[in-house]
Image (cartoon, rainbow, N blue to C red):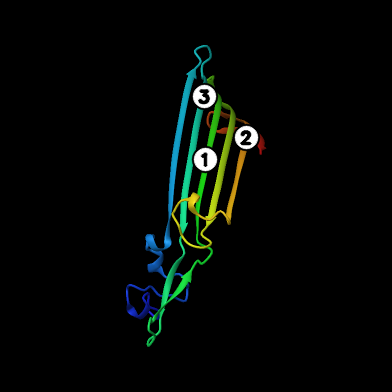
Amino acid sequence: PIERPYANNNPLYLSPVLSTQNPLALSERDLTGYNENTTRNFQSSFSLTYTAPFLKGLSLRGVASYDANNYQSKGLHKPYNLYTYTEGLENPYTPVPQRSGTGNISNHHSNNNAVTLQGYLMYENQFFDRHNVNAVLVVEQNQWNERWSNLTRYYTSFYTKDQIRFADRQRMENDGLENQSASLSYIGRFNYDYEGKYLAEFAFRYMGHYAY
């Protein structure tokens, strides 16, 4: 290696490197900070099928699903010092401030959920031992919601504590947004074959979409 992580090879003094990102410094949580992320997911699905007794080959099916996601993250980027070494000085280790005025703490939160409803009308039958018919009609509805927010405060003078409340109020940023979307689809397919030799198929889909 052409660079050394320590000033004068002294492990008590981390030194600057050309990339400005001393990996040993960044690996020390108490010195430079940390990033923490938590994700929670929930997925569910339920289906019910009904076979009609009054018409051979006819069945109905309903499917419902609900998915939810929660994401939280916390990032702490502390100001810290690296050191250069100059032989002959009374104090040969000179501090080199890092993240001066740009150290910060941030919290990010997001929640989203999705609901899907599907209804199936299915028919399958054979006539005269030669004619095979298969048809499916589907109605599908989707709803999706999202909400997120981001909070950041800076340590413009000095580091206090790893809590948003205790960072400086003179410089802070926040952002957030809510999104909603929905769609409704009609899907159909019809298949016919004669003795498995001659085939015909027709399919369609129509979808309307809403986003806010």
Q: Residues within 10 Å of mark 2 (few under 14, many from 20)?
A: some
Query: Where's residue 202, x and y in %?
Result: 63, 32
Point out the residue furthest to the bottom here.
88
Q: Residue at x 42, y 72 (%)?
A: 82
Query: For residue 2, what is the image quadrant?
Result: bottom left
Q: Which mark is residue 52?
A: none
Inter-mark Cα distance, 3 to 2: 19 Å
- Give the labeled residue for mark 1: 111
Q: Amino acid at mark 3?
A: Gly
In the image, residue 113 above or below residue 3 = above
| Helix, strand or loop under label 2 | strand
Q: Which residue sits at x=39%, y=67%?
A: 25
Can you give x and y, in whole percent of width and height, for residue 153 in the image? 53, 54
Q: Earlier in the sequence, mark 3 or mark 2?
A: 3
How many other residues sit within 10 Å of disc 3, few (<14), some (14-19) or many (≥20)? some
Quarter occupied by the C terminus: top right
C-alpha separation, residue under disc 1 versus residue under disc 3: 27 Å
Q: Residues within 10 Å of mark 1 (few under 14, many from 20)?
A: some
Residue matched to label 3: 62
- Point out which mark residue 182 bears: 2
- Looking at the rendered image, the disc whose residue lies closer to the viewer, 3 or 2, is 2
- Quadrant of the snapshot with the N terminus: bottom left
| Residue 80 spot, x, y in % from top left | 44, 66
Q: For the point 53% across and 56% down, which residue is it?
A: 168
Viewer-proximal residue among 106 and 120: 106
Q: Secondary structure at mark 3?
A: strand
Residue 112, x across and y down, in percent: 53, 39
Seen from the viewer's position, the closer of residues 99 and 43 is: 99
What is the three-letter code of the residue carrying label 1?
A: Asn
